[in-house]
Image (tube, rainbow, N blue to C red):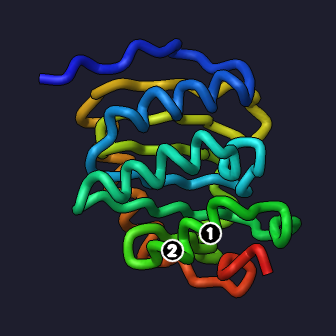
Amino acid sequence: MIEPPRIEPRLADRAAVRTALLSLLTQTRLGLKALVPRLEPALWDDPAVVEALRTLLLGHSRAQVAICVQDTAGIRGDLTRLPALVDRLPSRCSLRLAGRQDRELPESYVLLDDRYYLYRATPQARAWHTHAEPPSEARLLAARFADLWERAENHPDLRRLSL
């Protein structure tokens, strides 16, 4: 059995979130699901993060990446690497806009293999928290994400963002 990655339980800044995400991605086999307010280029267009996502998708035949954003304002032209990955692997890597009823949800999370996750309770909270293998909590997040993803919509600003 693979030992859970050792990462700090509280991530105080974007650099710590990036480091934790990269650490978790090295052990991810099935995929990533994320609910985020916006696609922050410093994290989601970071070359190392996008390369880790590409490695996951190409290295594991069943892996999927699904990212749901609550706001598309200001992202056109700010991202190039992640949209290129979505364009290259559209059946395995998707971006969607949260459904109307989900756009005001305060929480953000990144769920990996439905067992590790990064979580931020509100957009105002600067710190994220990490959780490794709390099965019941991860399953709840996975179920909430599945419902949210069904309500999410394709949006023109999330297609070919680099145009």
Callout count: 2
User: What amino acid type should be assigned to the residue bearing mark 2?
Assistant: Arg
108 and 48: which is toward the camera: 48
Q: Residues within 10 Å of mark 1 (few under 14, many from 20)?
A: some
- Identify the residue at image location x=48%, y=78%: 151
Res. 144 mark: none
Res. 88 mark: 2
Residue marked by disc 1: 84
Q: Where on the picture, by quarter, is residue 153?
A: bottom right
Quadrant containing the N terminus is top left
Asked if the residue at tag 2 contacts the one at tag 1, i.e. Cβ–Cβ closer than 8 Å, the answer is: yes
9 and 59: which is toward the camera: 59
Looking at the picture, does residue 136 appear above or below residue 101? above
Relative to residue 75, is residue 10 drawn left or right? left
Q: Position of residue 150 (x, y in %)?
A: 42, 76
User: What amino acid type should be assigned to the residue bearing mark 1?
Assistant: Ala
Relative to residue 158, is residue 8 drawn left or right? left
Q: Where on the picture, by quarter, is residue 159?
A: bottom right
Q: Position of residue 118 (x, y in %)?
A: 51, 34
Looking at the picture, does residue 73 appear above or below residue 49? below
Q: Residues within 10 Å of mark 2 (few under 14, many from 20)?
A: few
Q: Position of residue 36 (x, y in %)?
A: 63, 53
What SS does tag 2 mark? helix
Quadrant containing the C terminus is bottom right
- Identify the residue at image location x=36%, y=61%: 64
Q: Position of residue 40 (x, y in %)?
A: 75, 50
- Identify the residue at image location x=46%, y=27%: 23
Q: Where on the picture, by quarter, is residue 123?
A: top right
What SS does tag 1 mark? helix
